[in-house]
């Protein structure tokens, strides 16, 4: 690849230089010119069938499909010339003749490329007088529902299943205007990554059953985040309405998940709105836990910890920032930290290198290990007599309850109260990861930021904020006002994180030094 | 021979000489008629020499596009280390065309010989003959002939004892018009849905199984042995004196309102008027010709002024507003309703659209619905603009030319027989149907 030729061309009057073999559509994108398209998708093989990306190339006999035409030296491309616009207007009119005008009841409305481009350059009326084609809605299995009447047959879904999921369950059945997306007899869209066809569909033909009729696209607030449901660290968008997470979608990152998110990750968002949240700090009065002010609760927690060895059970779902501060607590008290991680079956996406639903089902397993917490199926094994057990949002099982005995007292820093735990001295309620800002380290050592998507309940505070206050109560220097400052402290304390900051990480993340290479090969 | 009629004296019988001759079908019978002499000769020549002879002869593709065959063969770079393929396009699906069918029915060994020579000339060891799914009898004849030829060692790993490998396989289509488009045909041969592919890459670079491939029509390949036997000069002479660009003989399938429909073989440059009135016997008694579609349903429809002025070669048809195409000649007389004929053609394309490109998938069906509405008497004057604009949107904007082919008869029909459309619209019924009922 070293000697790839550079091609110079002009798109809409702007000079463009791209590598040989780049398509006109991709070249135009590099200078901010969006050529309308439906079937083209950067994560899929080119089909060239929707004909929406027709552009005028000077000296060419015909209009060119920008997605399927490679750039050539000296080419002059007009995207918005009259000829090109007329051609695309014709395509839009044809796409709409059999498309129902049911936008008011269509989930895609507001994020529909057919709406957008029709608004941008379509006709204001239709000359079509004949009856529209009708096919009934079909359940495709998995999370996917097919509304054939809205389908524009761009074949993105077919190509995803063929070439990326490599489980060719979908096809184009029939011909002409009778064509529809067919499903292999007896097969369903049950591939662990099949839900991506909903995202890929540019119109409302493939819909998520989970999201069906739940919200209108324009009501949603969107936040750049990371899917926390395994160690892969797929970049995601968390969508909320009225402070409730209603959908999680992939956010493109060529280094991690390209354009995709698995069904397990996508649909496992309800816990982010979870019930039984801790809303107020609590301290023990006699045998009962009673609500208290933050200052009182922090003071009580500091009193419990002072002079004792802290044994920290840290959730691998906590951010690097929180884990860093917990590690400081461990160091300060001469204690230890451990965690357990849930496991499930691994589910790779064959078409993308090193992308898989990982068996370890937590966001920050690698971060926790790097910051000194030991991974164990019996994380309480190291608990010594007289230790203060700090349960930092870690799940507690029946077996854990039995192993709690050596602890002198228990501090809870978490989103929920662990059921059945005796001897809790103080409870410090924290935000979950959708309610605060922070970073996770994925299984390849890539540090990635997530932003706050919604407000924390009650008086719960960001985990890093609570822990910084706790350390301050113990006399530590922790004057942090922003999570970025905690991360800066982390980066200066740990050689592996050296040089990283929120600015350099951006929203796509960077690997730590000496990051573990991908299995088999580097990306 | 104006098969199934006795040959007309003005025909030039080269490819059709043995149409109707049952003895010519078998290998023995074919050998007695001079078969496989050209192949033996070809295997003794260098591939480059064969390509040279075919180039000299001026032979052009008989499938419709009329691309020079020798030039096409020369795109196949010898010694590129890749397997080359020859595909013989026997998916003769163009409405009105039935010439390849007769070649395969009566002279299957002529095609195998042409295939073997073509394969050798382009450095291919494998040739696929892709036969239209509905061609039951030609398929049986071709399969039997391939078996005979292989058993006799004419084709196979040691073709004619020369140590050269030339394999010919017969591949049956599943009944889609679009599989006659060369890239769709390659997909079909590979076992995929017969959807046309985006070009480039062109088949000579990446064709069937991603390897360099040449696709030739049945008639083209069947003509090659005759050129090798008789020489390029002989072939070149069969042309208009003032037009050396179209050479040789051409098979014409004639159907519709003529007294003697059938296959005719005439030299390039034959006057179309004499062909229609003399060879084909003119219109049925009491009728007059109204329109001719000279090259299969995808070419513009000619009115009689254009048709009678035309000469029968590639340039002669273009000069008079149409194309030679596949030379499937559909003749329409004055008792026929042009709107109905064109609506029927549009319906064919709407049925056969592969559904990839938007303009074709939706446009062919929309065109059909409007045409059928006009034919039923429910059209409006605004439909003209709509049809012409749909036609414009369907032309030159898709992967293959199926949608162009649907627009062509509609646009030429509106241009040349607008009065018939208007009569439907103003009279609110089909005037021809009204006349028949009266």
Image (spheres, rainbow, N blue to C red):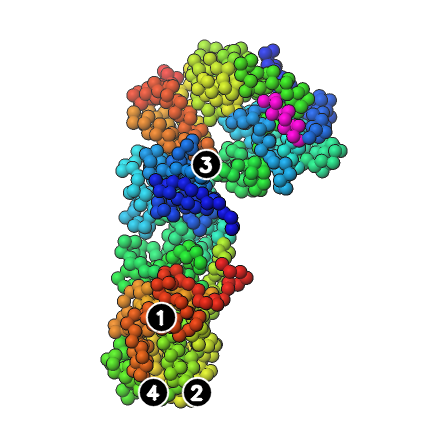
Of badges 3 and 1, nearer the viewer stands 1
Callout 2: SS: loop
- Residue labelled with disc 1: A488
Q: How far apart in space, not on screen, are marks 1 and 2 (Cα)? A: 33 Å
- Residue labelled with disc 3: B399
Total of numbered circles in the picture? 4
Q: How far apart in space, not on screen, are marks 3 and 4 (Cα)? A: 76 Å
Which numbered dot is residue A306?
4
Q: Position of residue A303 (x, y in %)?
A: 31, 87
Residue pictured at 35% horizontal, 21% vertical: B421
Q: How far apart in space, not on screen, are marks 3 and 1 (Cα)? A: 55 Å
Instruction: Give the letter of the chain under mark 1.
Output: A
Q: Residues within 10 Å of mark 4 (few under 14, many from 20)?
A: some
Label whose residue precedes the other's in the sequence (2 or 4): 4
Q: Is residue B239 magenta?
A: no
Residue pictured at 44% horizontal, 76% vertical: A372
Of badges 3 and 4, nearer the viewer stands 4
Which image quadrant for residue B5? Answer: top right
Residue furthest out toward the left: A293
Instruction: Give the letter of the chain under mark 4.
Output: A
Instruction: Give the letter of the chain under mark 2.
Output: A
- Residue labelled with disc 2: A384
Give yes or no for contact between labels 4 and 1 (Cβ–Cβ under 8 Å). no
Q: Are marks 2 and 3 on the same chain?
A: no
Q: How far apart in space, not on screen, are marks 2 and 3 (Cα)? A: 73 Å
Q: Position of residue B398 (x, y in %)?
A: 43, 35
Residue pictured at 46% horizontal, 45% vertical: A6
Callout 4: SS: loop
Of badges 2 and 4, nearer the viewer stands 4
């Amino acid at each position: 690849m070293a000697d790839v030729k550079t091609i110079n061309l002009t798109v809409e009057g702007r000079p463009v230089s791209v590598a040989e073999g780049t398509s006109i559509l991709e070249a135009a994108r590099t200078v901010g010119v969006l050529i309308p398209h439906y079937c083209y998708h950067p994560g899929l093989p080119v089909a060239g069938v929707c004909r929406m990306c027709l552009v005028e190339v000077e000296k060419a006999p015909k209009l060119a499909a920008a997605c399927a035409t490679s750039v050539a030296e000296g080419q002059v491309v007009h995207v918005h010339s009259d000829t090109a616009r007329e051609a695309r207007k014709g395509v839009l009119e044809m796409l709409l003749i059999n498309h129902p005008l049911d936008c008011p009841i269509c989930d895609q409305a507001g994020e529909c490329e057919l709406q957008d481009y029709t608004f941008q350059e379509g006709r204001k009326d239709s000359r079509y007088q004949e009856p529209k084609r009708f096919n009934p809605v079909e359940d495709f299995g998995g999370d996917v529902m097919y509304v054939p009447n809205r389908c524009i047959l761009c074949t993105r879904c077919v190509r995803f299943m063929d070439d990326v999921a490599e489980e060719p369950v979908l096809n184009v059945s029939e011909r002409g205007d009778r064509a529809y997306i067919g499903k292999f007899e007896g097969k369903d869209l049950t591939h662990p990554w099949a839900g991506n066809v909903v995202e890929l569909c540019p119109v409302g033909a493939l819909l998520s059953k989970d999201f069906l009729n739940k919200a209108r696209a324009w009501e949603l607030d969107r936040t750049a985040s990371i899917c926390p449901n395994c160690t892969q660290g797929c970049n995601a968008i968390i969508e909320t309405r009225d402070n409730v997470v209603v959908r999680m979608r992939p956010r493109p990152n060529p280094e991690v998940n390209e354009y995709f998110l698995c069904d397990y990750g996508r649909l496992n968002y309800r816990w982010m709105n979870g019930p039984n949240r801790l809303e107020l700090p609590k301290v023990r009065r006699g045998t009962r836990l009673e609500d208290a002010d933050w200052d009182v609760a922090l003071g009580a927690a500091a009193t419990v910890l002072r002079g004792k060895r802290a044994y920290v059970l840290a959730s691998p779902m906590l951010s690097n920032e929180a884990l860093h501060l917990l590690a400081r607590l461990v160091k300060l008290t001469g204690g230890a930290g451990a965690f357990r991680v849930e496991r499930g079956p691994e589910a790779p996406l064959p078409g993308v290198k090193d992308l898989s639903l990982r068996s370890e089902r937590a966001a920050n397993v690698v971060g926790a290990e790097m910051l000194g917490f030991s991974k164990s199926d019996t994380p309480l094994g190291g608990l010594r007599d007289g230790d203060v057990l700090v349960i930092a949002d870690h799940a507690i099982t029946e077996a854990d309850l039995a192993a709690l005995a050596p602890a002198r007292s228990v501090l809870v820093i978490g989103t929920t109260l662990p059921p059945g735990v005796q001897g809790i001295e103080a409870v410090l309620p924290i935000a979950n990861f959708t309610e605060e800002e922070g970073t996770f380290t994925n299984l390849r050592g890539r540090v990635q930021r997530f932003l706050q998507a919604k407000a924390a309940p009650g008086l719960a505070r960001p985990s890093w904020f609570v822990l910084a206050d706790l350390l301050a109560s113990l006399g530590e220097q922790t004057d942090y006002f922003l999570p970025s400052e905690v991360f800066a402290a982390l980066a200066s304390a740990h050689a592996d994180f050296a040089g990283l900051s929120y600015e350099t990480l951006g929203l796509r993340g960077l690997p730590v030094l000496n990051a573990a290479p991908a299995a088999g090969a580097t990306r | 021979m104006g098969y199934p009629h006795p040959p007309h004296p003005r025909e030039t019988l080269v490819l059709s000489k043995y149409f109707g001759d049952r003895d010519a079908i078998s290998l023995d019978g074919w050998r007695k008629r001079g078969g496989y002499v050209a192949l033996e000769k070809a295997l003794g020549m260098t591939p480059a020499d064969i390509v040279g002879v075919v180039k000299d002869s001026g032979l052009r593709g008989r499938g419709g596009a009329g691309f020079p065959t020798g030039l096409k063969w020369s795109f196949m770079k010898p010694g590129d280390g890749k397997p080359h393929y020859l595909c013989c396009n026997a998916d003769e699906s163009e409405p009105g065309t039935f010439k390849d069918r007769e070649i395969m029915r009566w002279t299957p060994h002529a095609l195998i010989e042409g295939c073997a020579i073509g394969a050798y000339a382009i450095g291919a060891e494998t040739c696929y003959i892709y036969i239209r799914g509905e061609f039951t009898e030609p398929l049986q004849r071709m399969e039997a002939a391939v078996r005979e030829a292989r058993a006799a060692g004419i084709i196979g790993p040691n073709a004619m004892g020369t140590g050269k490998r030339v394999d010919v396989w017969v591949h049956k289509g599943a009944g889609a018009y679009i599989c006659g488009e060369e890239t769709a045909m390659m997909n079909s041969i590979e076992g995929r849905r017969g959807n046309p592919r985006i070009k480039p890459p062109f088949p000579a670079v990446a064709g069937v199984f991603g390897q360099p491939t040449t696709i030739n029509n049945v008639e083209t390949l069947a003509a090659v042995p005759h050129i090798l036997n008789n020489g390029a000069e002989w072939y070149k002479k069969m042309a208009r004196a003032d037009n050396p660009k179209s050479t040789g003989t051409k098979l014409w399938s004639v159907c519709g309102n003529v007294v003697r429909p059938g296959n005719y073989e005439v030299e390039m440059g034959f006057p179309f008027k004499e062909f229609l009135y003399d060879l084909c016997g003119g219109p049925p008694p009491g009728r007059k010709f109204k329109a001719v579609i000279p090259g299969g349903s995808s070419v513009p429809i000619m009115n009689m002024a254009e048709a009678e002025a035309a000469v029968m070669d590639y340039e002669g048809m273009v000069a008079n507003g149409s194309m030679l195409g596949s030379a499937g000649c559909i003749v329409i007389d004055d008792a026929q309703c042009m709107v109905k004929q064109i609506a029927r053609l549009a319906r064919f394309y709407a049925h056969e659209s592969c559904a990839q490109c938007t303009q074709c998938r939706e446009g062919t069906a929309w065109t059909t619905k409007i045409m059928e509405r006009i034919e039923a008497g429910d059209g409006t004057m605004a439909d003209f603009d709509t049809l012409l604009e749909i036609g414009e949107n369907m032309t030159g904007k898709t992967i293959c030319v199926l949608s162009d082919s649907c627009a062509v008869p509609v646009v030429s029909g509106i241009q040349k027989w607008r009065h018939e459309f208007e009569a439907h619209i103003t009279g609110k019924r089909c005037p021809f149907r009204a006349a028949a009922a009266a």
